[in-house]
Image (cartoon, rainbow, N blue to C red):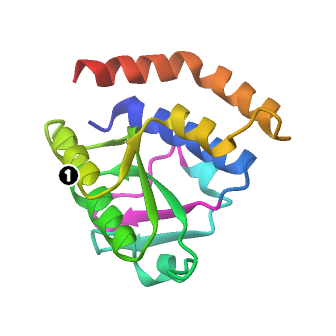
Amino acid sequence: MYGSQFITTSQKMLKAASILSIPVFVTTQNAARLGPTCNELTPLLEKSVEHVDKKAFSMWVPSISRHFSSETPSEVVIVGIESHICVTQTAIDLIKAGHKVYVLRDGVGSCNKEEVPIAMDRLRALGVTVTSSESWIFECMGDAGIGEFKEMSALIKEFSGKTKEVMGTLCKI
């Protein structure tokens, strides 16, 4: 399911990344044939470190992986589609490269909704942390005393209704 839930969570996470100065890496799957990144996200992608058009299913392509070091493992958060193809293959490649991987359940989708829980089960078994966007945001902040907390709190409030809607939809699936 692509729908508004995937877009809403992606918008929230891109805004959170901007506030917390977290680098963003974006890939588009064969834009010439499948189309560009959706218009709702385009303005939020202007500050991405890399935006790569790819044909590989994993986004762990050389132009992205060159920003990471296996000597110093990173924590990487994934949102995207298709959960059972690009998201899964990217997570597998990141784990193989020694990184800690989080997949945000409210930030992934598939054109076949039945594929999502299968992909999430597989990813958990591989050591990926499957969580929600709000849970990850608070884990990332760690403390209400950080300078960005007020701005992050406003972001959480801004998305509060939409987040409840997204989570409600996911609980029905």
Residue 104 visible somewhere in the drawing: no
- Residue 31 image point, x, y percent: 36, 65
Q: Say few, some or many: other residues with alpha carbon within 10 Å of mark 1 (under 14 / 14 to 19 / 20 or more).
A: some
Residue lying at 80% horizontally and 40% vertically, measured from the top left: 148
Residue lying at 58% horizontally and 37% vertically, measured from the top left: 12
Counting every numbered tag in the picture gives 1
Q: Name the element at disc 1.
A: helix
Q: What is the magenta range?
A: 23-41
Residue 19 visible somewhere in the drawing: yes
Answer with left or right where residue 35 lies relative to residue 74: left
- Residue 145 image point, x, y percent: 83, 35
Residue lying at 63% horizontally and 49% vertically, measured from the top left: 43
- Using the image, determine if residue 50 lies above or below residue 77: below
- Residue 125 image point, x, y percent: 23, 53
Residue lying at 51% horizontally and 21% vertically, measured from the top left: 162
Reading the image, the residue beneath label 1 is: 122
- Using the image, determine if residue 146 lies above or below residue 68: above
Q: To which quarter of the image does residue 137 belong?
A: top right
Quarter holding the C terminus is top left
Taking the magenta stretch, the answer to whether it contains residue 36 is yes
- Residue 14 image point, x, y percent: 60, 46
Answer with left or right where residue 57 lies relative to residue 62: left
- Using the image, determine if residue 76 lies above or below residue 162: below
- Using the image, determine if residue 15 lies above or below residue 134: below
- Which amino acid, by three-letter code, is at mark 1? Arg
Quarter holding the N terminus is top left
Q: Nearer the viewer, residue 13 or 33?
A: 13
Answer with left or right where residue 157 lies relative to residue 127: right
- Residue extending farthest to the right is 147
Taking the magenta stretch, the answer to whether it contains residue 75 is no
